Amino acid sequence: MKAILRLSISITIIILIPIIVLAIPINHVEMQINTTNGPKQELVKDQVTQIYVDSYPESPGWIVCGKDCVIFKDDNKKDNIFIVGNFPKKMNYDLININTFVLNGKYIGKKRRNGVIAECFYVESWGILGKIGRKNSCFDSFSKSSLTVADKIFEDPILVYDLDEFEDVDYSEALK
């Protein structure tokens, strides 16, 4: 009887330890910001600002869905944007597709990369707007405020660039 109990406890520990390790929080990213819905606000070059972005499946990889506590209510007028600076080059895709990211930094104008022209934002710091949403139900009980060991293990490259990958865009191209 004691042997069965020890075996059961050992098996339980062997199963639980990896799950517990995967759930360990490693980087707090939740940002609680009181936002309102409103009209689109234009980005101003070289101005320190806070923008909110959602992932976009093609280059440049992101769309601006808000700025400075305002979430844009008109989905048709969202700008595509390149992200450079202090933002991870890899992330768990389960987080990318369902969370809105908060980027603090400066808008640096329109840039061109591989024939794509879009707005470009230099990130100084970042987080996730509100609680972290997790696409995979296996990880629903994991931290809602921090990235975890599992997020680090399951990360893949995302569309974030280095500033030296871009060409400047002249005035006539910027109007397009």
Image (spheres, helix red, strand yellow):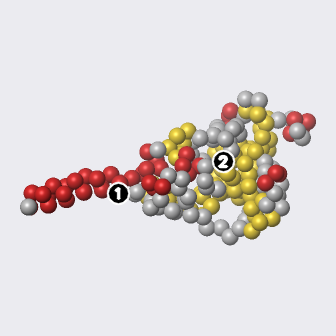
Q: Position of residue 47 (x, y in %)?
A: 77, 55
Q: Which residue is mark 1?
A: 20
Q: Residues within 10 Å of mark 1 (few under 14, many from 20)?
A: few
Residue projecting furthest to the top: 114
- Quarter-wise, where is residue 75 in the image? bottom right
Q: Quadrant of the N terminus?
A: bottom left
- Label 1 amino acid? Ile
In this rendering, the count of numbered labels is 2
Left or right of residue 48: residue 133: left
Q: Secondary structure at mark 2?
A: strand
Left or right of residue 18: residue 130: right
Q: Residues within 10 Å of mark 2 (few under 14, many from 20)?
A: many
Q: Residue at x 54, y 42 (%)?
A: 90
- Quarter-wise, where is residue 173 in the image? top right
Q: Position of residue 63 (x, y in %)?
A: 72, 48
Q: Position of residue 27 (x, y in %)?
A: 49, 56
Q: Position of residue 74 (x, y in %)?
A: 81, 57
Relative height, residue 28 to residue 164 (above, below): below
- Label 2 amino acid? Ser
Q: Which residue is mark 2?
A: 55
- Alpha carbon separation for disc pair 1 and 2: 29 Å
Do labels 1 and 2 touch, CB within 8 Å? no
Q: Residue at x 68, y 70 (%)?
A: 34
Is residue 26 visible in the rendered image? The answer is no
Q: Secondary structure at mark 1?
A: helix
Q: Residue at x 55, y 46 (%)?
A: 93
Relative height, residue 31 to residue 163 (above, below): below
Q: Residue at x 50, y 52 (%)?
A: 136
- Quarter-wise, where is residue 24 in the image? bottom left
Q: Quadrant of the C terminus?
A: top right
